[in-house]
Amino acid sequence: MTAAKWFRRTTWSPADAADFGARLERSRSAFHRAQYLRIQAAHLHEAGTHPLAEAALGLLDQLLAEWPDESQLSSAHMQRAECLIDLGRPEEALAAYQAALAARRVSPNFGNDAHHGFAELAVALRRDDL
């Protein structure tokens, strides 16, 4: 695997996870670790399978727990919401979208489309209270 592709895998075997973890530990800063986790999670989620969405969710949870860089927070929460929707957990997805919106209010320079996803999900769930 080329050096540029180590955080853009579309498979997630135990060997893939171990190699990713080893490379992640060698990363320069918390910002880079958070960014690599978020990018890798996006590639796994885009692959479109239930196990890879679960793996992506785990990477995003790791980002939030260990390296919550403000530049990555809103996008990480939004990606969590998208994974949770695909995993059939819409109420948790609403909470993740709300966390994305809260992070965006704190750091408005790091925007995304979480507001659209939140609105679409609230309408789909007929959550008039939102």
Image (cartoon, rainbow, N blue to C red):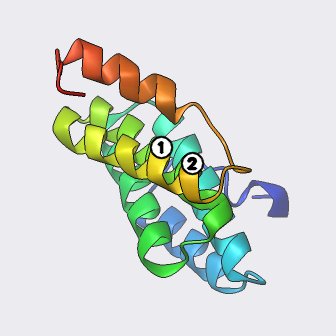
Q: Residue at x 54, y 72 (%)?
A: 68
Q: Is residue 48 above or below residue 60?
A: above
State the quadrant of the C terminus: top left
Secondary structure at badge 2 equals helix
Q: Residue at x 28, y 38 (%)?
A: 94
Q: Kindly report the distance in space between the C-alpha atoms of the residues bearing marks 1 and 2.
A: 6 Å
The image's mark for residue 128 is none
**In this rendering, would 106 be left or right of 99?**
right
Q: Which residue is mark 1?
A: 79
Where residue 42 sits: x, y (%)? 56, 44
Q: Is residue 62 above or below residue 28?
A: above
Secondary structure at badge 1 equals helix
- The amino acid on which the numbered mark 1 sits, given as a three-letter code, is Gln
Q: Which residue is mark 2?
A: 75
Q: Residue at x 45, y 62 (%)?
A: 59
Where residue 5 sits: x, y (%)? 75, 54
Is residue 31 among the parts visible in the rendering?
A: yes
| Camera-nearest residue between 116 and 51 | 116
State the quadrant of the N terminus: bottom right
Crowding near pointer 2: few (<14 within 10 Å), some, many (20+)? many
Report which quarter residue 25 is drawn in. Answer: bottom right
- Answer yes or no: do the residues labelled 1 and 2 have beta carbons within 8 Å? yes
Where residue 105 sits: x, y (%)? 56, 51
**In this rendering, would 94 be left or right of 3?**
left
